Image (cartoon, grey):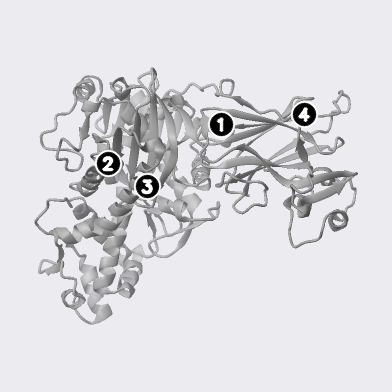
Amino acid sequence: MMESVGVYGFCGCKAKNKMKCDSRWEIAASETAPTSAYSSPARSLGDTGITPLSPSHIVNDTDSSVSEQQAFLVVVAIDFGTTSSGYAYSFTKEPECIHVMRRWEGGDPGVSNQKTPTTILLTPERKFHSFGYAARDFYHDLDPNEAKQWLYLEKFKMKLHTTGDLTMDTDLTAANGKKVKALEIFAYALQYFKEQALKELSDQAGSEFENSDVRWVITVPAIWKQPAKQFMRQAAYQAGLVSPENSEQLIIALEPEAASIYCRKLRLHQMIELSSKAAVNGYSGSDTVGAGFTQAKEHVRRHRQSRTFLVENVIGEIWSELEEGDKYVVVDSGGGTVDLTVHQIRLPEGHLKELYKATGGPYGSLGVDYEFEKLLYKIFGEDFIEQFKIKRPAAWVDLMIAFESRKRAAAPDRTNPLNITLPFSFIDYYKKFRGHSVEHALRKSNVDFVKWSSQGMLRMSPDAMNALFKPTIDSIIEHLRDLFQKPEVSTVKFLFLVGGFAEAPLLQQAVQAAFGDQCRIIIPQDVGLTILKGAVLFGLDPAVIKVRRSPLTYGVGVLNRYVEGKHPPEKLLVKDGTRWCTDVFDKFISADQSVALGELVKRSYTPAKPSQLVIVINIYSSEHDNVSFITDPGVKKCGTLRLDLTGTSGTAVPARREIQTLMQFGDTEIKATAIDIATSKSVKVGIDFLNY
């Protein structure tokens, strides 16, 4: 909104000493309003003010605002995950064919390697060295003393969700304890994917592929706060994916929306229904892949020579099997977060309407890793584990890789133990640190369900492994139960379980047991790649999501005529005989309000003082929908429109000058514009949550 306060804002004073100018206005304020400890942003800043035109007209315009699509040759989507990342692409002339990496080099046995770990390695000089399996393997092979100088980071995406005051200067901590700028790390990672994708496209095209021909899509959790979503865009600018001047070339896609779009493009027979199949890792032994996939693979054999990429034909439309108004929930369970989105199908085109704003929390598969860490604390002591991480960072990475592969083998009906190999340096360092053996520590800890094997392994009973999953799965089920209590969700027909963590049979079983009697539980094939493929489809047709829910309330700060008894006395400002109420929040849209794609909300204002030469419109947001003043708790400034009214002396300016302010909603990002109707001058701004 706006910190602007009308008349006193543009003082016209020529004082070179700003202190003198400011003190004049402090005196003016104290003469006109009761003194109090209250501080008015409007009064203290002395910006020029606006007041709503009477009557202020509001126009919701959805047609004229949908921006024209630039012609791109290809859409490249980057699924930047907490634990693993990948990219896929589709040529705009062949939108039914999605190209996904067949297998990344250096992959782990027993794990799908169509994505690569979200790990990054910087040299001791802090220069980018490698990403993914390559980073992990190189770091692992370093001499332990040398490894301490290198900066190795993994699972760093969650920092954007957990940091309350995220800024461009937020730090991440590498495995060796050194700090590095988060923006730099995210930019390096995106730059790596940009180079990989352009190289692959150039190989396919047989000539250099231009970045300007690519529409980029980056996925983020829907439950992320706005600063985190904006941070990802800033990282993309720094990585050279797109420039701020050509911001339309990059779409920030919401992960569960991308998954929803992919699910909508398939037929039900191309998915696995948990209630009718005993699925393990998303597949049962008797599964027959749908006819669409068979045709797609045939198409690949005949038309593609790429050894690294698989091409999937996306054919069939789930909405052809649904009825108008059918609702479904997408549960996107990844490494860091679980995102829940409720969509409704709108026929005949199968467009999607968001029925309930995205919810979720930090209940991803990382929670299982944290439980394992807590178990190690219990057995070996927190002091030792924390010291081991710092002194033997590469060995700690090895231990967590060993745990990851056993974690994936956990299943409800498993009876034999799971063996986790302890690195030799763990056993050796523990003996030096404590003076006794790892085996002794296990006996002393009274942790019955973890035994020591003479081959140097921790033997975990299936119940012990399942117990590590329980807190995270319980959180997901509880969150879903809350969601199903909402009236909008009461008649949901399907629940789509997607994301990497959805491969876990323990999670599949828990969701089926809790909600199988309320709706059909469906898992897409290749469940871990659902978001990536959906992001490609979203880039090809961003208009497929027609209605979203606004996560925040937005408005601007204005002056209103002061009304005795209605407005607080400390908000009174008297200037040139007019009594104003300062700091009023003039709302454009409320949190959780339905917003159509490209919807424009227009408001008209007039300068509080006709002679003002500059109009400053400050934009504010809040998570609450009931906001009266820009000084209310939780209200944050997130944008400024500064409109210069000078140079108009030759034109006939009306006495009641109209400044039209427009906010465009419905996209994953929000834009604001101010237009001086008399002169057609305009200014635009993207809402900024990082720099205010």
Q: Quick check: 23 left or right of 671?
A: right
In primary-sequence order, the first of circles 1 and 3 is 1
**SS at badge 1:** helix
- Residue 630 horizontal/vertical position (percent): 67, 48
Which quadrant, please, contains the N terminus? top right
**SS at badge 2:** loop
546 over 106 or under it: above or below:
above
In primary-sequence order, the first of circles 1 and 2 is 2
> Mark 4 — residue?
658
Give the residue type at disc 3.
Asp
Give the residue type at disc 1.
Asn
Q: Residue furthest bottom?
A: 435
Q: Marks 1/2: CA distance? A: 31 Å
- Label 1: how many residues lie within 10 Å, few (<14), some (14-19) or many (20+)? few
> Mark 3 — residue?
482
Give the residue type at disc 2.
Trp
> Mark 1 — residue?
246
Q: Quick check: 457 left or right of 600?
A: left
State if disc 2 and disc 1 touch (CB < 8 Å): no
Give the residue type at disc 4.
Glu
Q: Nearer the viewer, mark 3 or mark 4?
A: 3
In primary-sequence order, the first of circles 4 and 1 is 1
